[in-house]
Amino acid sequence: MSATNELLAAIHARLTGDAVLLGLIGEDGVRDRLATGRKLPSVLIGDVNSNDYSTSTERGEEHLFSLEIWIDVGGRKQAQLVASRLHALLHDAALDLGPYRLVSLLHARTQSRREPKTKLYVAELRFRAVTEGLPEWPP
């Protein structure tokens, strides 16, 4: 059993519940994939890697994930504005993960680039979260 889905659901709820962020990207701007014909800018939930981070007394996981900001108008400056808001919403945030406990959620890095084929700007934020959970541990 993994806390990954609860973590992603809590992140999605946090982002879609923020009026400032939605003012920057639009009401339907948080998605799990970039679809052709969808309005930009958007924030995409990118790759997620979850690793066992258990101790002898607690079951734990480390989650490394990315959020991608795709911008068509406003370029790198607009992407950095959205990235700044994502950082403010998630870095060291306290999120409710149901049966799991979020130990930490920290921003690791941000990088931005222009995609050569599409000419869109992309800013990628990387985060690291650590969770504990499941009352049956140890087995």
Image (cartoon, rainbow, N blue to C red):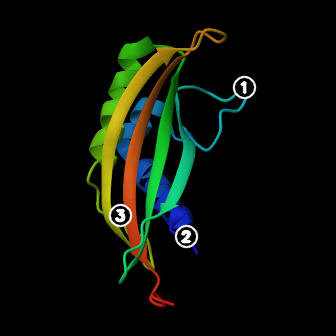
The residue pinned by badge 3 equals 95
Q: Residue 124, how many percent across, how many down?
A: 45, 30
- Spatial CA distance of label 1 from label 3 is 32 Å
Sequence-wise, which precedes: disc 1 or disc 3?
A: 1
Q: In the structure shown, which secondary structural element does the residue marked by tag 3 occupy?
A: loop
**Residue under the image location 67 percent in, 29 percent down:** 38
Q: Nearer the viewer, mark 1 or mark 2?
A: 2
Against 14, is 35 above or below? above
Question: Dot 2 surroundings within 10 Å: few (below 14), some, or many (20 or more)?
Answer: some
The residue pinned by badge 2 equals 2
Q: Residue 32, how many percent across, how many down?
A: 62, 44
Kind of residue indicated by mark 1: Gly
Question: Relative to residue 8, is residue 110 drawn left or right?
Answer: left
Kind of residue indicated by mark 2: Ser
Against 130, is 89 above or below? above
Sequence-wise, which precedes: disc 1 or disc 2?
A: 2
Kind of residue indicated by mark 3: Leu
Question: Dot 3 surroundings within 10 Å: few (below 14), some, or many (20 or more)?
Answer: some
